Structures are given as C-alpha cells and as structure tokens.
Image (cartoon, rainbow, N blue to C red):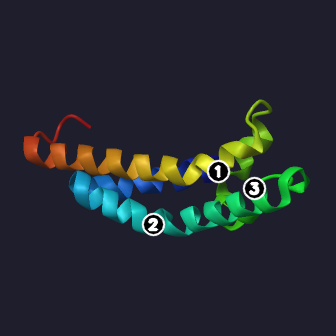
Amino acid sequence: MIIAFVFLSIWFIYGFKYNLGIKRGLIVGLIGISDGILLQIITFLLYLNRGGYYFGPVTMIPWVVPFLGITDTVDFISDIFLCYMPFLALILTLLGSFLGEKYKSVKCRNWI
C-alpha cells in the first residue's frame, strides 16, 4: 500500500515540480502511461477473444505491480480497479502540473 502511494505521488510531484501546465502535463502524462494503455488494449483484446475464460487483467501486471498492495489490503476493491491506474496517474500528473503552474504564477511561497 505504501509503494502504491509513493508511486502515485511521484506522478503528482513531477508535474508540480516542473510547472508543466495543462497541455505539457497532458503530453508528459500520456507518454508516461503509454505502456499502460498499450497493455490495457491487449487486455481488452484478450477478454474479447477468450470471453468467460479470461480471469482478469493479468497482462496489466507489469504496469500495476506497485498497486497490488491496494487490492490485497482493501477487500472490497476488485482487480478490475487495477485497469484504471494508468488514468489515475494521468489525472495526478495533470493536477500536479496545473497546481505547479498556479503556484509559480501566484508567487506566494508560503501556502504549502
């Protein structure tokens, strides 16, 4: 669970530190999650091909290994939640980029 928190906070901190803004934050986020999106497409194609015999997002494992602690710790979160993690990382990058840009433009360094 701690590893997942650290991994997600790195996305936010990167966007905040470099003051990327919305457009550049979106580009950096998409580049960062591109392998996750590719693995999601493969997962979806396997699900369509195998149907009911497919047991979950096993092809997403290379990307979602840091988040396995969340599904193991919290019982009511299913494994399908792992498929949404690339998009959560994109949202955190966008949020960090937007807040970093606002922080830079306000020039008020005492609010953190």
- Residue pictured at 88% horizontal, 50% vertical: 52
Question: Label 1 belongs to which residue?
Answer: 83
Q: Amino acid at mark 2?
A: Gly
Where is the C terminus found, in terms of image quarters? Answer: top left
Q: CA distance from mark 2 to mark 3?
A: 19 Å
Q: Amino acid at mark 1?
A: Cys
Q: Earlier in the sequence, mark 3 or mark 1?
A: 3
Local crowd at mark 2 within 10 Å, few (<14), some, or many (≥20)? some
SS for callout 1: helix
- Residue pictured at 35% horizontal, 64% vertical: 28
Q: Which numbered disc, 2 or 3, marks the residue closer to the eye?
A: 3
Q: Amino acid at mark 3?
A: Pro
Where is the N terminus found, in terms of image quarters? Answer: top right
- Residue pictured at 41% horizontal, 47% vertical: 92
Question: Label 2 belongs to which residue?
Answer: 32
SS for callout 3: loop
Q: Nearer the viewer, residue 59 or 73?
A: 59
Q: Nearer the viewer, residue 43 or 22?
A: 43
Local crowd at mark 1 within 10 Å, few (<14), some, or many (≥20)? many
SS for callout 2: helix
Q: Which mark is residue 63?
A: none
CB under 8 Å between discs 3 and 1: yes
Question: Label 3 belongs to which residue?
Answer: 57
Q: Nearer the viewer, residue 61 or 59?
A: 59
